[in-house]
C-alpha cells in the first residue's frame, strides 16, 4: 500500500544547486579582479586568505574584502585605492552570479514534474532572507515555491531546531507525517525532520556534507533527483492541490 504524501519541501544550498562550487569560483574571480586592478599579490595567496576570512567571520559577513586587505602590509597599497580594490572584487563576485549560478538540472526536472502534478512544494532554508530569495530568483526556481518559502532569519528559528520545520508545515497547513523533506546535511536537515516524523531524503551529490554523520538515518538516500522521482512515483500516493 502506498504512503500518503501531501507536500515536498526542499533545502536550498547544496541541494538544489552547488553552493561550494559557485562560491569558490566567485571568490577566486573576486581576488583575480583585485590583481587585475594592480594589487601585486599572487592570486592563490589572496584566495587562500579570503577562504580563511570567510571561515572565521562566516559566509554572511558583509566585509570579507575589507578584512582581507587588512591582512597584508601597507606597502602593497601605496599606489592603490583600497575602496576601488574592494569594489572591483564585489563587482566580480556579482558578475559570477549572473553568469554561473545555475541549479542542478536533475533537480529542476524533478521540481517541474512535481509542479505539473500540482503537488505542494516549498523551501525551508537557513540563511539571510534577502540572500536566499536572491538565489531562488536567480536560479529561476522562485515560481515553483512561492508563497511557501521559509527562511530562518525571517522565521526567527534556525536549523537544526525542529521548530523551523514545524512552523513551515503549519504555514502550509500540512501534517509533518505526510511531508517529505529533501536535504544534503544529516545533522541540519535529516535529524530534526526525523524527530517530527517527516519522510526524509538525503541527497548525496558530493557536497561539503557528504562525510557528515547524523544521529539518525534518512528514510531514503539518493544520488540524484531522477532516483528520487522513481521512489515518489512508486511508493507514494501524492495528494495534490485542488
Image: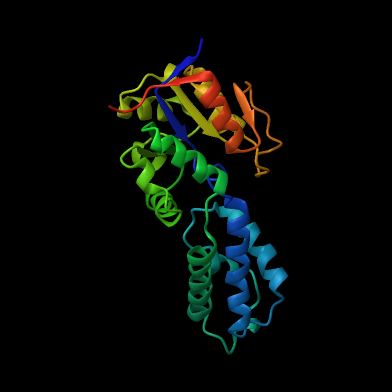
Tell me which residue sits at (38%, 48%) in the image.
142
The image quadrant of residue 170 is top left
Residue 231: name its quadrant.
top right
Examine the rendered structure and indicate whether residue 170 appears above or below residue 55: above
Question: In percent of the image, x 49 and y 16: which residue is there?
Answer: 197
Q: Quadrant of residue 35?
A: bottom right
Is the C terminus in the top left, top right, bottom left or bottom right quadrant?
top left
- The residue most toward the left is 242
Instruction: Judge by depth and name the residue closer to the eye, 100 or 63.
Output: 100
Q: Is residue 160 visible?
A: no
x then y, percent, for residue 224? 62, 38
- The image shows residue 27, relative to residue 54, as above or below, that is below
Asked if residue 186 is positioned above or below residue 68 in the image, the reply reads: above
Q: Is residue 164 left or right of residue 19?
A: left
Count of marks overlaid on the render: 0
**Which residue extends farthest bottom?**
79
| Residue 194 drawn at (x, y percent) | 53, 20
Question: Residue lying farthest top?
Answer: 1
Taking the image as drawn, is residue 198 in sight? yes
Of residue 144 and residue 14, the one placed in the foreground of this image is 144
Residue 173, position in %: x, y? 30, 24
Q: Point out residue 43 in the picture as x, y percentages from the top left corner.
A: 69, 73
Residue toward you, 121 or 78: 121
Amino acid at each position: 500500500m502506498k504512503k500518503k504524501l501531501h507536500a515536498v519541501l526542499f533545502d536550498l544550498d547544496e541541494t538544489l544547486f552547488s553552493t561550494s562550487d559557485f562560491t569558490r569560483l566567485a571568490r577566486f574571480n573576486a581576488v583575480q579582479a583585485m590583481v587585475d586592478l594592480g594589487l601585486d599579490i599572487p592570486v592563490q595567496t589572496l584566495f587562500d586568505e579570503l577562504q580563511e576570512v570567510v571561515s572565521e567571520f562566516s559566509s554572511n559577513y558583509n566585509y570579507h574584502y575589507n578584512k582581507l586587505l587588512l591582512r597584508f602590509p601597507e606597502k602593497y597599497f601605496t599606489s592603490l585605492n583600497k575602496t576601488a580594490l574592494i569594489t572591483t572584487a564585489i563587482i566580480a563576485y556579482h558578475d559570477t552570479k549572473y553568469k554561473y549560478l545555475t541549479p542542478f538540472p536533475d533537480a529542476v526536472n524533478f521540481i517541474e514534474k512535481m509542479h505539473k502534478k500540482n503537488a505542494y512544494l516549498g523551501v525551508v532554508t537557513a540563511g539571510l532572507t534577502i540572500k536566499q530569495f536572491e538565489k531562488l530568483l536567480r536560479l529561476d526556481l522562485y515560481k515553483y515555491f512561492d508563497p511557501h518559502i521559509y527562511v530562518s532569519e525571517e522565521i526567527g528559528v534556525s536549523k537544526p531546531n525542529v521548530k523551523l520545520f514545524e512552523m513551515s508545515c503549519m504555514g502550509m497547513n500540512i501534517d509533518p507525517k505526510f511531508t517529505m523533506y529533501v536535504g544534503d546535511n544529516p545533522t541540519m536537515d535529516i535529524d530534526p525532520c526525523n524527530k517530527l516524523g517527516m519522510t526524509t531524503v538525503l541527497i548525496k551529490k558530493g557536497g561539503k556534507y557528504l562525510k557528515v554523520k547524523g544521529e539518525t538515518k534518512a528514510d531514503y538516500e539518493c544520488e540524484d533527483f531522477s532516483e528520487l522521482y522513481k521512489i515518489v512515483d512508486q511508493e507514494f500516493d501524492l495528494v495534490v492541490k485542488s
